[in-house]
Amino acid sequence: MKQGISTVKKADAASRADGRSRGAATWAAVVQHRHYYALLLPVMALLVLIHYVPMAGIVIAFKQFNIKGGLWHSPWVGFKYFKQMLETPSFLAILWNTVRISFLKVLFGFPAPILFALILNEIPGLRAKKVFQTVSYLPHFLSWVVVAGLVMSMLSIQGPVNYVLSLLGGKPVIFMQESGLFTGIVVVSDIWKGIGWGSIIYLAAIAGIDVQLYEAAAMDGARRLQRVLHITLPSLVPIIGTLFILRMGGLLNAGFDQVLNLYNPMVLDKADIIDTYVYRTGLVQMQYSFSAAVGLSKNLVGFLMVVLTNATVNRLGGTTLT
Amino acid sequence: MKLQGIVAAVLALACMAGSAWAAGRTEKPSDEKMEISLIAYNNRGVPTPETSRVQKFLEDRFHIQMKPWTVDWNEKEQINVRIASGDIPDVWMGYAFPLQQMGAIREIPKEALYKYMPKYMQQCEECGGRDLWQSTVLADGKNWGIPTALSIATAGPAIVIRGDWMAKVGWTKPIETLDELESLFVKFRNEDPDGNNAKDTYAYTGYKNSSAIYQTTFAQVFGAYGVRVLTWEKKGDHIEGSMVSPAYRDALKRLQSWYKKELMHPEFAVHMRKDIDALMANGKVGAFEDWSNWLASFTTTGPWGKITAANPAHQPAYVVSPSGPTGLKGNYSRPAAPWNEPQVMGTGVSDKKMDRILQIIEEMYADPKLYAVMLAGFEGEEYKWNKDGVLDPIPLTPEQVKKLETEKGPLGTGYFRVNSVLPSIEKAYTTPARYPIDNWIRAAQTRLDYGFTPSFNEEQRVKDSNLTTLMTQFYYNAITGKIDVDAEWNGYVEKWMKQGGKELLEEATKQYLKTLK
Amino acid sequence: MKKTGSWRDRVLDGILMAIMILFTASIVLPFWSMLVDSFSTKDSVLRPGLKLFPRPVTVQSYRDVFASGIVAVGYMNTVIRAAVGTVLTLVCCFAAAYAISKPKLPFRKTVSMLLLITMFFGGGLIPTYLWFKQLGLIGSRWVLILPHVAMAYYIIIMRRFLEAIPAEMEESAFIDGASAMRILFRIMVPLSMPVIATVGLWSVVFHWNEWFDAMIYDAKTEHTVLQLLLRRVLIENQSSAMLNLEVEDEARLQRTEEAVKAATMFVSIGPVILIYPFIQKYFVKGIMVGAVKG
């Protein structure tokens, strides 16, 4: 390896005089790494075949799609559908709802599985650990139809929450009708549903920590909390960083399925997100160009967020995605 | 013996010769079976099989070759993607606007409709009136589908009230005014009709349905103010929007007062449709408004079935079109269903094929027995006819259905099914429990003139959708008392007008005046 | 590692246990309630309050789910796509992750960027469908598998885990003259079992739950997957005989029998829960294999 580095460096220096040897050096490196390229080949082939070829069809967002013209010969309408989306009367409110819900989900929902993994790791007794862990991810398998039903019956007038409230002397509250509470309900229920499943990746990371590190620390007199902070947590940092960057890419995805099942006309002002608005108004009934425009916009924002977050994390000393 | 044998043999030979001769006669070389591809519509939740008994029956009857798509029509995305990729059936149900925009369907001229489907169109006009063309005629003035009409829904929704609760609070007279209804509801709330010494009963409830708030839940109340929610109302020489009319405001205020008096379940805006069943079964609400098919089920197999079974004196009461404070009354009915898809035909369909398809549907809708086969299967197996001539389904368990399928082959239903229910076949469509309720409602209700439905272009449709959101929020905030209706009214109307309502009203008026000529 | 616990540690243990128990209870209760529902009759399922036991007990809902007989086919098709899909995905993604985890790989940044882009941009439904049609994938089992093999998300995460493995692990083998492939399989895979198990789990669960792509790209009856079948069961079991189309979708679809809904949930989730204990060992207490030899 060391030899490889100096070869490249020498070639670099030389190439300032002759551009061609830089290319030759790169080619040499490629040849040297050919086995790795072989490993990369299946994925790259599939990327092109499955993902990149159809990507060209993204032009559909800029066209008035009709069957005869297909993707390539349908009339070009430019930004018509993007404008249509932006000119929605409540567009700013909808956008703000989307960003607000998403952001709070990241703020509270991102750390939650990490915390859960740390706590689970500290539970004494392997059997207890296993049981807790197995039960924890079960809600991930429930559809939002079911979970929304659970949430609504918990929060209903005759539900347990209001019961406790009445015991404490308060008046019954119709939680689901209060716009101000909606975001909180969405965030909390999302955490409940996803915390167990989301913690698995962190548990996997913890499982890779050398047990000897803990033993050494214990012998040095480190207490429980110190061990967690100085051994467990630091080993999670790379994966946390990566997952955080990727999570930021979902900024405009506030959770369509969840919101659709939880919201009702009373809370529309705070609950309507981009996806539910588009769905409810039936604007995507076979309107492929419009839904493509909306999708492209959301994805563009997501991608920019990832690039931005990546650069920031990189600057802060973390690893980069690329 | 021998003589008999000879006679039998001769007769047999004669028969065979005769039938061969007859067969030769009918099988002319030009007699090809027309091939028609289509999507079938049924609620069985299974994809249409490649061939089926009903399909065979229809093929023989109409002398055609059917090529049904082996899809489940509930899986719309699948169907739509195939169509968008150019794989288009000859006839199916779909929304005319986006399909025409995509270039998937062909025009169906009105002349052809009247020529090949005279009885169908005549009945449609009687039921649907001028609203008939709302889902098939587009902004270009051409007709792109077979219009639909629902005679059965000319019986609009009605309120059903628990019989035993009425007995408990001592209410015996029929309900004819809105005030009477309110008095009964007050009793339901305050007089402990379920006898459990707890004030846990509500009179009424609804459920969240943001996309169709004009349907039910409070249709009778709005009707008592002469309003049908979300309608472009015909007012002589122009169109007004019902959702910004003073009568609508008054109705909202009335409903708000009901909410404040706790007559309605406080969570009516939050409930999902399935919660209604639980509420009814557990004695939490005493009345509910819905379409007759649901009403029938509530009181037979549904949540209140046991009540009527336990005591025939506790029949549920139905209320429709109670009169309001100014004497107005009315019931919502939607004889042409704007959200259901009309029958459309693919771009590849020739005129000859189109005519044939129209003929087939005309025949289907003229003959209830034929319609019943298409809809439900075979008499004696899936259903029988009761004494009123109404189709009475024979309840089959899933195992029995499976058994029939393995023995005789798949059943298959819903071919060429159009989203219309017309008087000629109504009895085949309804159920024995629903039929008397429908008739009663039709007789007792006062039908509100169902307004006008304009054909908007793309930009206008988008505006229309956005206005619905605005309207929905105001509707719910008003009823639950979140806002002061009087104080907020003018602001709401202004906003509605500014966000496109004004433009839509002008367009609707323009189109309406054209129809008057 | 049992030390004579300080009381502080024991209190902490107690608190953590309490938290876990509360959280677990919040999950067990509704699941138990649903289990009870799945064994209840259509009437008793509507009774209010927390149900501890079905009264009366009936398996009718499960019979309804299995009545059509093709649930077995659904299971088989789902197992096929989950098994083949996951194996292919793990092999391809892990290999790719290993390759791009090498800092000196030329064009590494480009490859990463290409991967990242696929996470955000795609042609959408129509372009993808048209292209798959051209490739002849429509109606083939492979259309349910191939699009999910090159997953940027999995590759990025696996790469992260691989980067955390100290270079010494490889270098000894490298010096011994082992090829990239050999190192990959003999050394990297065993060291990466936790992340491989995680990604494998994600992939299996994805295939298990996925029905939309099956509905759009491969609707052949012989290929129907479990979730699609169960969705159809739910539609079939709407309360009150509904030949009627006049009632619009939202209201109609919401009235599926609660008991059948619960039963379908357990039919769908059951196998995953049964398999899980076998891979749990990779997450709950895994040990770093050995040390650097030689």
Image (tube, coloured by chain):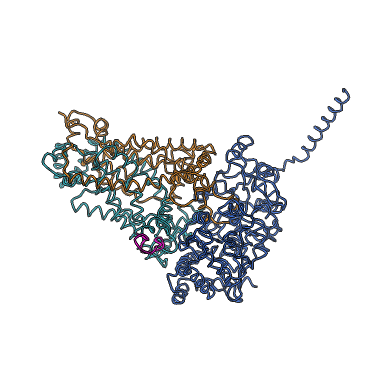
Chain colours: A cyan, B blue, C orange
Residue B91 part of the magenta segment: no
As drawn, B418 above or below C61: below
Front residue (pair C285, C248): C285
Q: Position of residue C97 (x, y in %)?
A: 28, 40
Image position of B296 (left or right of A281): right
Q: Quadrant of the N terminus of chain A?
A: top left
What residue range appears in magenta?
A165-183
Q: Residue at x 49, y 48 (%)?
A: C45
Q: Nearer the viewer, residue A10 or B408?
A: B408
* Vertical relation: B252 (above or below) C90: below
Question: Does A176 appear in magenta?
Answer: yes
Q: Residue furthest top?
A: B2
| Whether residue C132 is visible | no
Note whether B237 is above or below C57 in the view shown. Answer: below
Q: Position of residue A273 (x, y in %)?
A: 39, 60
Q: Is residue C139 visible?
A: yes
Please name whichever residue, A202 or C86, is drawn nearer the observer in this view of the structure: A202
The answer to which quarter of the image holds residue A168 is bottom left
